Image (tube, grey):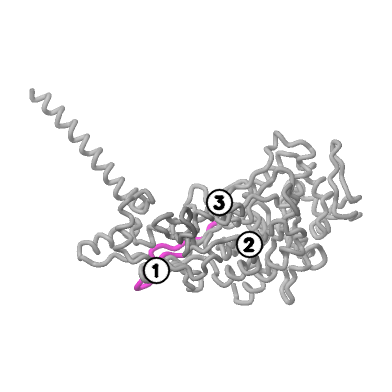
Amino acid sequence: MDKTIRRLCRFFIVIFTVLALYLGYVNLYLGPSLATSPYNRRLAAIEEKIPRGTIYDRNGEILAETKSQKRIYPLGEDAVHVVGFLSRRYGRTGLERVYDQYLLGISRENELQSFINKALGRVQKGHDVVVTLDAALQKKAAEMLGNRKGAVVALDPRTGEILVLASSPSFNPESLEENVSVENTRYDLLLKDEDSPLVNRATQGAYPPGSTFKLVTGGGMLTWNPSTSYRSIDCKGEITVEGFTLPDIAVHGRTDFDRAIALSCNTFFARGGLELGPDKLYKAAEAFGVTKNPWEGKTQEVPCRAGTLTPPEKMTKAQIVSTAIGQGELLVSPLHMALVAAAVANDGKIMKPHLLDRVQTQDEGRIITKYTPQVWLEPLGQTAARKIKRAMQEAVENGTAVRAAIPGITVAGKTGSAQNPSGDPHAWFVGFAPVEEPKIAVAVIIENGGAGGRAAAPIAREIMRMALKFGQ
């Protein structure tokens, strides 16, 4: 009998221990995320009791704040794809969703203070979130996009700080619940809109990169065969592979690497792609992060679509030459192409892109957490990066990207006109400035905009000019 009782006692001790550990895990580890889950019906009650924190840009400009129990967005549609919105009816998106725990002050870092506040009967306050966006640059980018479909991305290649994530068309985050008819609110109409204004084209857009991808192909060529930097070919205006003819934009004649970048010679990079072969060409794309999500396994600050291209085992020679110049089945986001430009600017290193700068208390400004920049990928050696950098500078000074030039500042750039089956080519530009010590890298796409040098380069020029003028 005693033996049975002892066994029973051990059994209950084990059960209670497991239960205690599980409850501790749920409360301490899962607690904050469960508290801010959109499926948590108590969330609305929690939010009513807690003054929500403010979201600021890098210069202290307000991006989101609460006034008279209503969430206000001073930049409105210019920044909604990244800042997001807060709606009882439609939930929360963007930074409002990602950093909800901090904005409500219920993150793990604040558990002790929350306990003290409850014990002493104090009002629990949310924390302020400071992000890397530049409100003035964001507004300028949205203004220059205007009514055209497209996106602008700008970041600091030295740190990975995202300065601009602009997407067009957009929408007003403060009027989503307004009724426009008996059946529909404004949000309902956005869901049905064929122009997809709810999609963040800067990070979720899937576009053929056109000639801007020659930076990736060129990086692979210089990495696998450094002699590429000083050899030349005879461009006759087209190249034919297995019955497929790839036209060039002109007959460039004797063309070396710098001239091929500057004048965007298809033949040079098509041949380079063939020499690399499918495996190395694919690895070059992987090395630059084209096929990756920068936030994979981490806090997903913005929805991001990883790039896609034909798997190497399925690449024919015709697909190789098409992929090498940014066409074929290759699709990327503007953010990925901004990171490609940043790799060249930063001597071959891509810093992990991020939006969070720091979280701080509302009253004292005490820092709760702060982001530390870190290297994400290293697709290029310094020598190769500087070779491409010089070629991109030549493109702005004497090539296809002359409209990106800024008086008194050395600019590096690469244009692209990406063919697509649904209309006129997409206009691309990627670049950075100043060449000697790059402080900003930019990617611009205008859907069906035609020539990148004409439609996209001027937008990038003004973003870079404005950023450098105010000492970014």
- Please tell me whether mark 2 or mark 1 is closer to you in this view: 1
Secondary structure beneath dot 1 equals strand
Report the Cα–Cα distance between label 2 and label 1. 28 Å
Badge number at residue 192: 3
Give the mark nearest the N terminus, 2 or 1: 1
Q: What is the quadrant of residue 10 in the picture?
A: top left
- Please identify the quadrant where the N terminus is shown: top left
Q: Residue at x 59, y 47 (%)?
A: 306
Q: Is residue 4 above or below residue 105?
A: above
Secondary structure beneath dot 3 equals helix
Are circles 2 and 1 on residues that touch, CB within 8 Å? no
Q: What is the quadrant of residue 16 in the picture?
A: top left
Q: Residue at x 58, y 52 (%)?
A: 204
Q: Is residue 10 above or below residue 64?
A: above
Report the Cα–Cα distance between label 2 and label 3. 24 Å
Residue 260 highlighted magenta (yes or no) = no
Query: Tag 3: residue type?
Result: Lys
- The boundaries of the magenta stretch are 358-374
Give the mark nearest the N terminus, 2 or 3: 2
* Residue identifier under label 2: 152
Query: Tag 1: residue type?
Result: Thr
Residue 360 highlighted magenta (yes or no) = yes
Query: Tag 2: residue type?
Result: Val
> Is 95 left or right of 353, judged from the image as shown?
left
Badge number at residue 66: 1
Q: Residue at x 70, y 57 (%)?
A: 385
Which percent across, then down, holds residue 458? Answer: 72, 68
